[in-house]
């Protein structure tokens, strides 16, 4: 028995029998673009994460490719916001302009675009408001979401990721893209997205804090496991190409449930609050930051994730 234990501790054998691996090409790295030039503003709540102007975004893409990261998730922060998020519906808006520039300079970069309105509206919610009920009007928001998808598609997006959690969004986008001639453009659905307290720092970087209330009327109750599975399977039925669980760290059981219920590729979003906790704990000397970060990424993969969207991606790739 002792000899067997020693054999198991041999590093070469450990590598041969390891069940779960993390690779640089498992990751999608979020980027936040805003108008201007020479802008690279670090977000205080998320050390190492920046709002960047397009020229800085292009420099960042070069760094990412050198690390072996060829997939990004692009968020836009417009100069002007209004009640319906008009910048998101414009072929010369911040997202469309950025996508064209990135694809022109880095044709091998796989550009995923966030499709939502919270960054573009002056009220910070994810669509057109129903002022009577003080929430988002689901159907009115669907009516302009197809327009936004076509803006992204015309700019050259490689995949669209609708994060607003509107009922029927996948059907709406698939129909709009198919009619527009983009039948092969994939959709990564935020299929199981919880109304979570882990999103706080993201609203700093994306400048999308709701001006009133919260998003619990159109995001999921964190207590609901069976509903979480139903939501993802419904999006699969409507034509999603990739499913997603967001957040990831507190929902590993949901990741495993959906992995066992569906054969579609499964993404997880390692969200801003999860990132910030590790960063600040590491900076305070409370944890071995690199070790805990890698253990967390292995946990996501072990639970069943194929793709990890994470602000840690550059650091992970550097360690690998």
Image (cartoon, grey):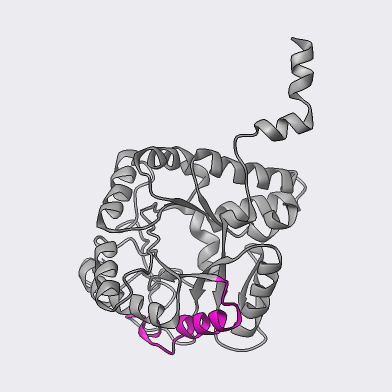
Q: Nearer the viewer, residue 39 or 74?
A: 74
- Picture quadrant of residue 16: top right
Where does residue 143 sit, x and y in percent of width and height? 23, 75
| Left or right placement of residue 54 versus residue 122 in this view | right
Residue 25 colored in magenta in the image: no
| Left or right placement of residue 249 versus residue 226 in this view | right
Where does residue 93 sit, x and y in percent of width and height? 44, 86
| Left or right placement of residue 248 versus residue 68 in this view | left
| Residue depicted at x 50% and y 84% | 100
Please say if 295 is above or below 74. Answer: above
Q: Residue furthest top?
A: 1
- Picture quadrant of residue 24: bottom right
Q: Quadrant of the N terminus?
A: top right
| Residue 130 visible in image | no
Residues drawn in magenta: 84-109
Label count reads 0
- Picture quadrant of residue 106: bottom right
| Residue depicted at x 39% and y 82% | 154
Q: Nearer the viewer, residue 240 or 48?
A: 240
| Residue depicted at x 59% and y 89% | 36
Where does residue 222 sit, x and y in percent of width and height? 39, 45
| Residue depicted at x 33% and y 74% | 182
């Amino acid at each position: 028995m002792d000899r067997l234990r020693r054999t198991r501790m041999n590093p070469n054998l450990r590598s041969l029998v390891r069940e779960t691996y993390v690779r640089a090409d498992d990751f999608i790295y979020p980027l936040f673009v805003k108008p201007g030039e020479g802008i690279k503003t670090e977000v205080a709540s998320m050390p190492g994460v920046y709002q960047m102007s397009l020229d800085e975004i292009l420099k960042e893409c070069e760094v990412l490719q050198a690390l072996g990261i060829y997939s990004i998730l692009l968020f836009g922060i417009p100069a002007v916001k209004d009640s319906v998020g008009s910048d998101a519906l414009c072929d010369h808006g911040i997202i469309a302009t950025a996508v064209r520039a990135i694809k022109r300079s880095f044709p091998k970069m796989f550009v995923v675009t966030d499709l939502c309105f919270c960054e573009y509206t002056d009220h910070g919610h994810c669509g057109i408001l129903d002022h009577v009920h003080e929430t988002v009007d689901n159907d009115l928001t669907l009516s302009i979401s197809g327009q936004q998808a076509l803006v992204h598609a015309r700019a050259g997006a490689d995949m669209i990721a609708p994060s607003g959690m509107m009922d029927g969004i996948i059907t709406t986008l698939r129909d709009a893209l198919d009619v527009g001639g983009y039948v092969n453009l994939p959709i990564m659905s935020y299929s199981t997205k919880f109304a979570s307290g882990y999103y706080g720092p993201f609203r700093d970087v994306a400048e999308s804090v709701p001006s009133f209330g919260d998003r619990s009327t159109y995001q999921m109750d964190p207590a609901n496991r069976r509903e979480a599975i139903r939501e993802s399977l419904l999006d699969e039925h409507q034509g999603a190409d990739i499913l997603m669980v967001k957040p990831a760290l507190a929902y590993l059981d949901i990741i495993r449930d959906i992995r066992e219920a569906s054969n579609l590729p499964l993404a997880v979003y390692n969200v801003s609050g999860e990132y910030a906790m590790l960063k600040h704990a590491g900076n305070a000397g409370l944890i071995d930051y690199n070790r805990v970060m890698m253990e967390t990424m292995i946990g996501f993969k072990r639970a069943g994730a194929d793709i990890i969207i994470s602000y840690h991606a550059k650091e992970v790739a550097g360690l690998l």
